Amino acid sequence: MYITKHGRDFAFPDYKPEYPPSPPYEIKHLSLALKVFIEDKKIEGHAEISVVKKRGGVIELDAVDMEILDVRVNGSSTKYTYNGKKLAINTEAIEPGTSFKIDIMYSAYPKKGLYFVKPKGKGGYLQVWSQGEPEDNRYWIPIYDYPNMKFTCDLKIYAPKMLTVFANGELKEVREEGEWKVWHWVMDQPIASYLIAIAIGEFDVKETMYKDIKLTYAVPKGRGEDIDRSFSNTPDMLKFFEEFLMYKYPWKNYKQVCVSEFIVGGMENTTLTMLTELTLHDEKAHAEFESEPLVSHELAHQWFGDLITTKDWGNIWLNESFATYLEALYMGHLKGEDRFICELISFLDSYLREYSTRYSRPIMTRVYKYPEEVFDAHSYPKGALVLHTLRTIVGDDKFREILRKFLEKHAFSSVDTEDFRKVSEEVTGEDLEWFFDQYIYNAGHPELTVRYSYDAERKVLRVSITQTQKEDCWDVYKMPIEILIKTEKETKLEKFWLSEKEQTLYIPLDEPPEYICVDPKFKVFAVITEEEELEQLIKKLKCTSIYCRIRAIRNLSKKISDRAVEALKEKLLDESEYWMARSEAAKALGSIGTEKAKRVLIEALEKVANPRVRRGIAEALGNFRDHEVAEALAKILKNKEEGYYVRAAAAESLGKTKWEEAIKILKKVKDEPSHNNVITIGAIRGLAALGSDEAFEIILEYTKEDKPTLVRMEAVRSMSKFNEKASAREIIINACKDENMRIRSAAITAIRETLDPRYIPILDSLIGRELHSGLIRAARETIRSIQRFTEKGVEYRALREEIEKIREEHRRLLDQVSRLEMKLR
């Protein structure tokens, strides 16, 4: 590998390369007996670990904040030391190559890894669930807690009799023992330690079959009616993945369990995927919300992540990029080609947000401090786009064969990027180091600036493509490229390879083009900018490629012109257009922000039925500041037939209008039931945008501990809008110490929005005591942002204000011209 572009702003000065450990032993099997004392948030355990010694005299296991009661080797007491993090066991008497057993008796009050969730308010149920990735199972199991070792396991979980227990593998026995019910789960195929999991609670359960695979769906008691809306496509997903990967589902069953207060969206524990209960939804929400992306992503991990597992965290893209790309492929299978392309667009947008606002780094990196740091938009969407590009280069059949052979060759083992490169080269018969160097081992991405002109005399189209990527990117990317050329009489597709910083293509063409579109089917990972005039963009809205259409819509958002507004109006109202493109058209009209654009959006509310498009319209109306817009938004909010998410967007936009009646309406709707309390959250955002003292007092109530977590998070974040108030700052400071890690995360976000240097000591204190390293990273980035802003903030604010003044003046002039034209007619 050839590494020259390390990126920017990812590594802090104290970071150093991280390499996977090489332990002097190999675990073959873990047998765990665990008593779970829910009220006390305590566990008592007996771990019996079957080990083969490779070398050395001491075996170290990861075990955090436990009370070690006894340690035995082959049944006899042995010497050990324990420092609160590592349990070191003396095995000097055992020869290398020998198999033996370690018994560890212990107790703990886990601070991470195993979570005890008590219900808020009426109707909730007790739950206990684990979240081991990346290295948190060491808080409740003394184990080697790193992904480069796999072993079988069986878990005997002692839980209160009224509760159900799920764990990895197959349920072998359920029996009563005194006050306990004992659930014995056996996983007889090897897995990494972070994939060991349990879920305990009161559940509604549904079971079905896919071929010989038993499928189990478990949701919090009382939510059984929601199971099918979230999980009914699971058999179809299994069928699709098996066919695409040409590899059978590798496990004996598949359980999906929804739990409360889950700290991530989903977790692919082997045979036991855990998901947030937030994915469950009622029939009304089903028109606006879907579970399939999350469900398919976690299922894809059963192959990529579980069957084969990253050897270390620097290679985590081998888990996450693959699952993300398979998720997109499934959504395309389920919803059609336009949806697949829109998934790729959303991946690109997500990565570019991280790249432009936070940092860049190579997809595969060894320079990090905490494993959680590499679970980011580089490992998920960017890596998925790189896989998509590889598929384009090698072809669909060879790409699928690469995946099949990768799985077959490395099944039940741990892998790194070089393993994947070697399989790719074996299948294709080509050297692919250049591909992995430019996309995986170096930071950044290609940016292509396209200019074109037509020579009528010579009947030649001249297309100039310049690679304009920034200095933190690979210097010159090599990639295939397609160019769609539309003339009045024909549409043609030309194919080329780019390999130069500047490349000019001469294409014979009998008549001038109406427009061109580079990479119309989104076949390669690149940011493409085509320098085009207004009329060319308007014509491109009729392109057969949704990628071209959406790029044209986004470019039209920068053209403050009545012609652009008319073209976007046509696209917004086009019932045959995919909803994502229509929503983009609404947002583009909001960005244009003229009187005519406003009129189009308000009138569209009377014609557009699709709730996802209506949500886009409601969001776009938040760019305007007058009573007519406010009244239109208020009408949406008052109509209970509108979708939850449409009303939530309307609530937020209503607050942005600053309308004097807005607070009355927001007060009326703020507690209306909705999917995941989105209307309440929208109302809080709207109140925060109003910024009044009365609005502040209302939001204050939602920062209290009895409120749902997502609502509390939004209320805490909203305190940033009132940072001049000492009481708001106090809420943020206290939230930094909250027991709920998501509330602490919201506090960090609020501080980042204020960029107030008074919070730096608070963040430093949080860093010193925080257990969740993702929050440590967020706090450190926030401190850096504050320091940079303090140095350059004044001139930056002045520049932003001046730009906005010029833009607003441009809008006013255009509105005057439009009104004058109407009078002249």
Image (tube, helix red, strand yellow):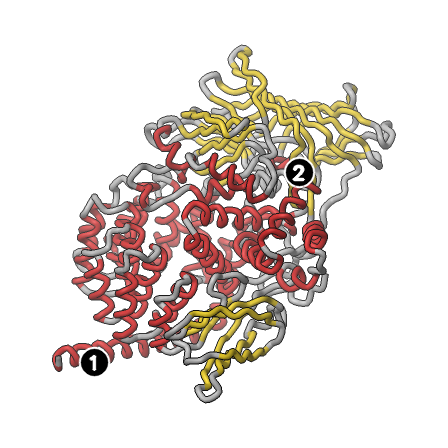
Mark pair 2, 1: CA separation: 68 Å
Residue type at numbered disc 1: Val
What residue sits 54% from the left and 57% below the top?
385
Q: Which mark is residue 490?
A: none
* Image height of 412 relative to 536, above or below: above
Q: Say if residue 175 shows up in the picture.
A: yes
What residue sits 45% from the left and 59% below the top?
345
User: SS of the residue at dot 1?
Assistant: helix
Pick whichever, 509 or 663, lies toward us: 509
Nearest to viewer (mark 2 / mark 1): 1
- Place residue 712 in its image quadrant: top left
Q: Residue placed farthest to the top in the image?
A: 178
Q: Report x, y in % for residue 328.
A: 49, 50
Residue type at numbered disc 2: Asp
User: SS of the residue at dot 2?
Assistant: loop
What residue sits 52% from the left and 54% below the top?
381
Pick whichever, 787 or 656, lies toward us: 656
Please report whichever mark, 2 or 1, sits nearer to the chain's N-terminal start.
2
Q: Report x, y in % for residue 662.
A: 20, 55
Q: Report x, y in % for residue 706.
A: 35, 37
Quadrant of the image containing the C terminus:
bottom left
Q: Report x, y in % for residue 146.
A: 67, 41
Quadrant of the image containing the N terminus:
bottom right
Circle 1 Cα neighbour tier, 10 Å, few/some/many (<14 / 14–19 / ≥20): few
The residue beneath circle 2 is 145
The residue beneath circle 1 is 817
